[in-house]
Amino acid sequence: MNKKIGIFDSGIGGLTTLKEIKKILPNEDFIYYADSKNNPFGEKSKKELNIIVHNIVNELLKYDVKLIVIACNTVTTKFINLLRKDYPNILFVGVEPAIKVACDNNYKNILLMATPGTISSKRTKELINKNKKEDQNIYLVSCTGLANAIEINEKIRINKLLYKYLNVYKDKNIDSIVLGCTHYPIIKNKIKIYFPNSKIIDGNKGTAKRVKYLLEVNNLLNNSNKKGTTKFIQTKR
Ligand code: DGL
């Protein structure tokens, strides 16, 4: 079925998700909605974000998309259930912190970096309660300002924030870092400087596999063998 896949985030972060999806679904067409005007999502109240998210979904539906990817951990952890209820005829796939992956791989000292919205969500607590074993520690780092600094490419602010949030964990034998925000893979190399021997994990691969699976089982895969296209929409700050 040759309809587009809709995908959105508060700006460029979700491009890290889009990249993973394109690796396994190269023939699909996408429409990417970057709501840069409303970045950072992770520091908005639930009420404000609710309006923003419904507006984005309504915009994407104008393009008759066959599935919507929520390329944002903050929106997934807080709103995916509500969106599924409010739009029962559309398939939603989200990105959420890959806590399960880190726990299943038996890492012992796991650092979760995410927005304040994701860190404080019920879903994040659920993921920890469900997956963490007794001998595992999960350190929660609420990175206020970081997604926004990445969005507007403020290099000095990014470096200062990373120092502020990460330096205190340097002696904690951190063996894995879960990037619980789709903006963070963009600065993966800077994060690595603090923990050169740690495994960096994000949820994008899992999301890509889920998109493929849902398109397959619902008979919605694009059957063209041409390379897919991407249309970009960006709201301006
Ligand atoms: N990239 C998003 C996330 O994964 C949102 C970041 C933000 O706007 O705060 O949470």
Image (spheres, rainbow, N blue to C red):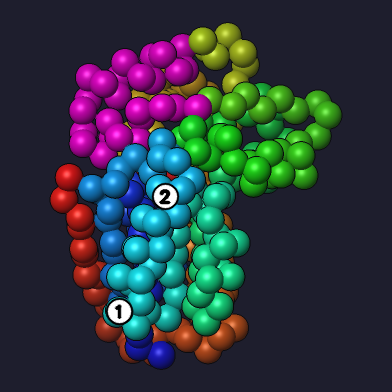
Secondary structure beneath dot 2 equals helix
Query: Looking at mark 2, is its residue's CB closer than 8 Å to ligand 1?
Result: no
Relative to the observer, which residue lies in front, 27 or 16? 16
Q: Is residue 5 visible?
A: yes
Tell me where residue 199 sits by quadrant.
top right
Image location (x, y in percent) of residue 20? 41, 58
| Residue 153 in magenta stretch | yes
| Quadrant of the displayed image that contains ligand 1 | top left
Residue highlighted by disc 2: 49
Left or right: 152 in relation to 15? left
Relative to the observer, which residue lies in front, 58 or 163? 58
- Above or below, 167 against 46 in this view is above
Quadrant location of the N terminus in the rendered image: bottom left
Quote the CA–CA distance across marks 2 and 1: 20 Å
Q: Judge the density around disc 2: few (<14), some (14-19), many (≥20) Cα neighbours within 10 Å.
A: many
**Which residue is drawn at the image coordinates 64% and 46% (left, top)?**
123
Relative to the observer, which residue lies in front, 231 or 27? 231
View extreme (left): residue: 236
Residue type at mark 2 is Leu
From the viewer's perspective, is the residue at label 2 or at label 1 nearer?
Answer: 2
Residue highlighted by disc 1: 62
Residue type at mark 1 is Lys
Give the magenta part as a residue range.
142-167
